[in-house]
Amino acid sequence: MQNAGLSALGLNWRYLAFEVDPDNLRAALQGAKAMNFVGLNLTVPHKLLAVDMVDVLDESAKGWGAVNTIVFEGRDDRGAWRPVREFADAPRETRLHGFNTDADAITRALREDLGLGLSGAKILLLGTGGAGRTAALKLASERVAELFLVNRTRSKAEAVANEIRERHPGVRVTTGYPAGPVDLVLNATSLGLKLGDPVPLDEQQFSLRQAAAVYDMIYRPAETALLKAANVAGCRTANGLGMLLYQGAKALELWTGQPAPLDIMRRALEKNVYG
C-alpha cells in the first residue's frame, strides 16, 4: 500500500517492515533517527510505549494516548523545526514528532464504508483494549448519543467508561449489552482472526437483528464469523480494510506533505491482502 503510494507520487523512497522487540524500541527509534529516516509507523505493542519516547506529541497522539506514526524533523538555521524531507542534507539536530492516525481512520471508515452518521448514534463496542479504547474515545468525541462497552475483563470496560464520562459528559456510556436496538456494533477484539473463532458477542444477551450495521476491525479474513452472522441478520457490514487504508494514507500525507493517492493505495492493499 505505502510503496504503491510512494511510486504514484514519484518519490524515490521505500517503505520497509522491521520486527522490533519492545525492549529494543527506544534503540530502534534512535537508530532510525541516526539513519535519517523520513518517518515510521508503529504497531502493537509499540504505540503506547512510544508516547514516552518521542520528543513532541501532536494533539492527536495526546488525545488518544498512543503513537502510530512518527515524523522525523530537523532544526534549520533559523531554529525552526521542519520535516527532514525538506533538507538537502542531513540536519544537524533531529527530533521525533509523534502522531496518531488511527482514530480519524476509524470514524472515516464508518462514514464512508457504512454510510453511518455518528452524531446521535447508539453504538455497541466489543473490546476496550488499545484499539477499542481509542475507538470509544473517538466516537465519544463525535457526539454519539450512547455507548455500550463490552469487554472480557469488565474492569477495563469500566475504566474506559469512566474516562469517557470525565472527558465527554454529554455521552451516555454503559458497560454491558443494550436492551434495545443500536445503530452499530463495532468489533475491536481479536476474535475472528483465527478460523473457528466464536462470534465476539453473547447472542443470548444481544441479537444482531437489533443492529442496523456491523463493523469488524479485522480485515483478514475478509468475512469473519461476526460479519457472516451479521449478513444473515440483514445488517449493513464492512471489515477493517478501510480503516487500515485511511490510517496509512494519513501517515503518508504527514511524511510527504502531499495528498495520498487513495485509489492506487486501496488497489494495492486489496491485492496484497486478498490476492
Image (spheres, rainbow, N blue to C red):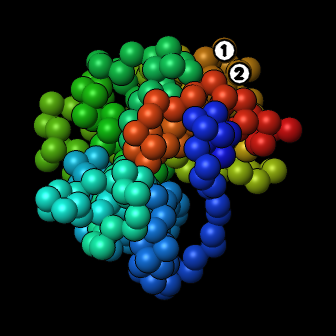
Compared with 73, 136 (above or below) is above
Residue drawn at x 30%, y 73% is 92
In the image, residue 96 above or below residue 2: below
Image quadrant where one finds the C terminus:
top right
Using residue 61 as the reference point, say whether residue 201 is left or right of it. Answer: right
Query: Which residue is painted at 57% across and 29% down in the image?
Result: 261
Give 194 or 96, whichever is nearer the viewer: 96
| Front position in the image: 58 or 133 | 58
Q: Secondary structure at mark 2?
A: helix
Task: Please tell me which residue is depicted at 21% across the width and 32% down the height of the picture.
Answer: 171
**Residue 225 x, y percent position in the rendering:** 73, 38
- Is 256 on the left-hand or right-hand side of 136? right
- Crowding at mark 2 (Cα within 10 Å: few <14, some 14-19, many 20+): some
Rendered location of residue 133, percent (x, y): 37, 50
Quadrant of res 174: top left
Label 1 amino acid?
A: Gly
Instruction: Give the image quarter of residue 57.
Output: bottom left
Q: Which residue is mark 1?
A: 234
- Of residue 120 and residue 21, the one placed in the foreground of this image is 21
Evaluate whether residue 15 shows in this view: yes
Q: Which residue shows up at 33% across the image and 67% down it?
A: 91
Q: Are marks 1 and 2 in contact (CB under 8 Å)?
A: yes
Q: How many marks?
A: 2
Front-lying residue, 157 or 167? 167
**Which quadrant holds the N terminus?**
top right
Residue 268, percent from left and from top: 73, 36
Question: Secondary structure beneath disc 1?
Answer: loop
Expressed as whole percent of the image width and height from the top left, the position of residue 177 reads 43, 37
User: Which residue is at the far right?
Assistant: 275
- Using residue 268 as the reference point, say whether residue 80 is left or right of it: left
Q: Which mark is residue 231?
A: 2
> Which amino acid, mark 2?
Asn
